[in-house]
Amino acid sequence: MQAKGCAVRRITTYLFPLLFIVMAVPAVAQEFASVSDTLSYEIHFRWDKSRLDTMYMGNNHVFDAIIAKLDSIGHAKIDSVVIVSQSSPEGPYYHNQALSKRRAAAMRAYMEGRHPEITDRLTIEPDGESWGQLRQYVARDTVMAKADRERVLSIIDDDKISIQLKKRRMSNEDSYRYLYKTYYPRIRNSRIQIVYHNILTRYRALSNPDIGLSRPLPMPLQHLYPLPLPEEMYRPTFVRDTLVIAAKTNLLYDAATALNFELELPIGEHWSVAVEDVFPWWERDNKYCLQMWEMGIEGRYWFRRNTHYVDKLQGHFLGAYVMSSKYDFQHDWDICYQGEYWSAGLSYGYSMKLSRHLNMEFSISVGWLSSAYRHYYPADDYSLLWRDRSDEGRFGYFGPTKLKVALVYPIRIQYKKRGGALCD
């Protein structure tokens, strides 16, 4: 009996651990098969662009890292690739929505061209304006004053106001220039999330008692946390703003066959300078004539704080102008005058956006006009024009001097832009 009892104890001593190991192996193997990891990358875009610039903000290093990682993982282990594309929240909302779609399409074309094996697992999500990512950056900022930071966060979090009003309040903040320079280039991006099966990582997790055994869930796309990048990546390649030259024509003058052209250049956030040229130059049979060459310059103060190209040269303005001209007007025998004049005064107007590429401007000018004039009359057969020395002199006039309904085409020119190879 004693020998039999010892045998039973020896059997139970070795059998139960062996049974535990045999039962545990399938469970561990099942855990291995259900494990996945998630990787996140950011590709940045130049302002208002959807083409991939490999030399901008370290994009070339990110692309190299993605290619190296996919090669090391192997396409068979890829579960899904999700690309979320965004634009910085300035400018018209509809334009930013379309821009984020174009950026997402560019990323899809790149990934499908370089990695066609994962096309069926590739998803793009144009996410419009990146308010959420901007909020994360502002919340972690240590440079802004606390009051400024809280005020900006309250504007971002205010869901009771329209997007346009939210943008206007943001642009009126004293810290807006800092935000636009520091964070806006970072949130013009496409974020790539790669979910892949990784057994080895899971095995290490099982051996670490501090890591749970449940499968990690992918991070919600709308709350992707901004990846920190070295500060030096942003400063050298930053495009601070765009310069806008507005080309205009006064439709009222055009309707009267008085061809005209105007260029307006914004200066800073509230000022602009406009140069105008009116140049109708035609005559017919010494009977009808409209010849004039007028040059004018006007300085304007825009009441709206214009810090971005989309907002520049829009809203209400007050201007001061000076202009001079020489002219020759004739309408049969009724009007036959030549002369020169100069004028100076004030202008008030309003400019509004018609479409993505066109604005409309309405303005009126009031001032003093002084003209030296000379009267002439045609011969009976209109073969000659005779100067009438009894009817010449100078007159002055105070009142409305210009009325404008102008079609405006803003021309955008980037500056502080570094070159780089563009992905086809």
Image (cartoon, grey):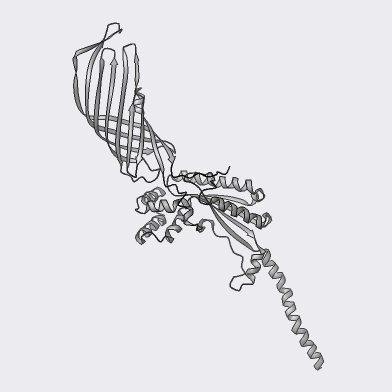
Q: Residue at x 59, y 64 (%)?
A: 216
Q: Left or right of 383: which side holds 138?
A: right
Q: Position of residue 331 (x, y in %)?
A: 29, 15
Q: Quadrant of the N terminus?
A: bottom right
**Residue 10 lies in quadrant:** bottom right
Q: Which is nearer the eye, 238 or 185?
A: 238
Q: Position of residue 140 (x, y in %)?
A: 44, 61
Q: Left or right of 14: which side holds 388?
A: left
Q: Position of residue 178 (x, y in %)?
A: 39, 53
Q: Quadrant of the C terminus?
A: top right
Q: Which is nearer the eye, 34 or 287?
A: 287
Q: Residue at x 61, y 48 (%)?
A: 111
Residue found at the very far top of the displayed protein: 381
**Residue 137 lies in quadrant:** bottom left
Q: Position of residue 231 (x, y in %)?
A: 47, 56
In this view, 181 is above or below 321: below
Q: Residue at x 67, y 56 (%)?
A: 74
Q: Left or right of 387: which side holds 21?
A: right
Q: Left or right of 55: which side holds 183?
A: left
Q: Which is nearer the eye, 160 or 235?
A: 235
Q: How many marks?
A: 0
Residue found at the very far bottom of the displayed protein: 2
